[in-house]
Image (cartoon, helix red, strand yellow):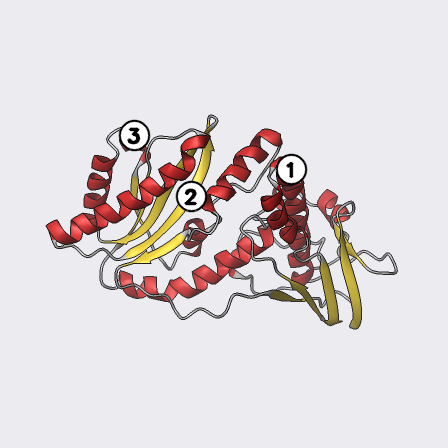
Amino acid sequence: MLKTKESNVPLLDTLETTSDCFITKSHESQYYNALRKKQTIARLKRLVDVSKPSQQKKYWKAWHCQNILLQDGNNLIGSLCRKRWCHTCERIKTAELINSWHKPLVELQEKGDLFYVTLTAPTVEKRKLHSELKKRYKAFVRVKDNMRKNYGIKLVGIRSTEITLSKGKYHPHFHLIQQGKREAELFLKLWLEQFPRADIKAQDILPIDPKDPKRLKEFFKYSVKQDVKDSVEAIATDTIYQALDSKRTFQAYGKLTRVKPTREAISNETKADFLPTQQDIWKFNPNKWDYTNSRYQEMIKTKEIFKALDKKERLLDV
């Protein structure tokens, strides 16, 4: 039976459980990477079928993300597409955001409690999604300016944008990490004045500790649901991606700046200590859910591991 070596778990892998199916921790990480690649390809197939040609080109870029891995000794190197519809790149982006905002948020908390605020408004039809999204961005700015001019409150925090689907309609909404309970409650009150038809029960204000990686991950996660099960979901997801195209889904406001971020990674290097030390080229095989080389060797044995794992472990935090 294959045994697992103990090692520290990366921030975004805290929910993954080491199993006897893995040779090393890096072998386990590559298993989950392969599942993410498989899921991305399945999603892209459906999106390409329903999207217009200009958008199809963008989806195809994600198709090639991490498609080839170059093995250099005990390292694997692959290029990144940096597209939000790529499961691997969205996960990397989430980690980058957490790393760059963690310290500023901890420092902000020392000056006052932080709160996780959800701001919603009624769902809209597909044809109104673009205009409604613009309307809500403008409403956010109006409320913020109102609080500064009429209440003498300069807000400090971060806003994230998310769009979900509800009963065939689109639901653009905001999440905030906002300093101060009074500020959060007043913002919510003024927001509801902008959208009197909004359901007050759909709004929320909860305390948040920036030292809790799970809560930060929830805030900085992807802004669009990842699963695309059929053509109906594909059309809806494609609509959402187009609505968010070229828009910043995370925006700080007030005097809050993140740690100077490193340039966005265009390639990803991971350990491969479960492989013989060598120079090799591995290509992803969708049918095998695995990377294979010119000798038809499988890198991970993904399907075998998937079958051997307990159901709770198979896709945990993929």
The residue at 75%/47% (across/down) is 286
Looking at the rendered structure, the kind of residue marked 2 is Glu
User: From where the camera sits, is residue 198 visible?
Assistant: yes
Reading the image, the residue beneath label 3 is 199
- Position of residue 6 relative to residue 53, above or below, is below
Element class at badge 3: loop
Mark 3: few, some, or many residues within 10 Å (few <14, many ≥20)?
few
Reading the image, the residue beneath label 2 is 162
Mark 2 to mark 3 CA distance (whole Å):
17 Å
Name the residue furthest right: 295
Looking at the rendered structure, the kind of residue marked 3 is Asp
Reading the image, the residue beneath label 1 is 46
The residue at 58%/50% (across/down) is 87
Give the x, y percent position of residue 253: 29, 57
The residue at 29%/30% (across/down) is 199
Looking at the rendered structure, the kind of residue marked 1 is Arg
Mark 2 to mark 1 CA distance (whole Å):
21 Å
- Position of residue 200 relative to residue 149, above or below, is above
Sequence-wise, the earlier of marks 2 and 3 is 2
User: From where the camera sits, is residue 184 visible?
Assistant: no
Sequence-wise, the earlier of marks 3 and 1 is 1
Element class at badge 2: strand
Q: Left or right: where does residue 203 sit relative to residue 145?
A: right
Give the x, y percent position of residue 308: 73, 45
* The quadrant where residue 282 appears: bottom right
Foreground pick, 180 / 125: 125
Give the x, y percent position of residue 303: 75, 46
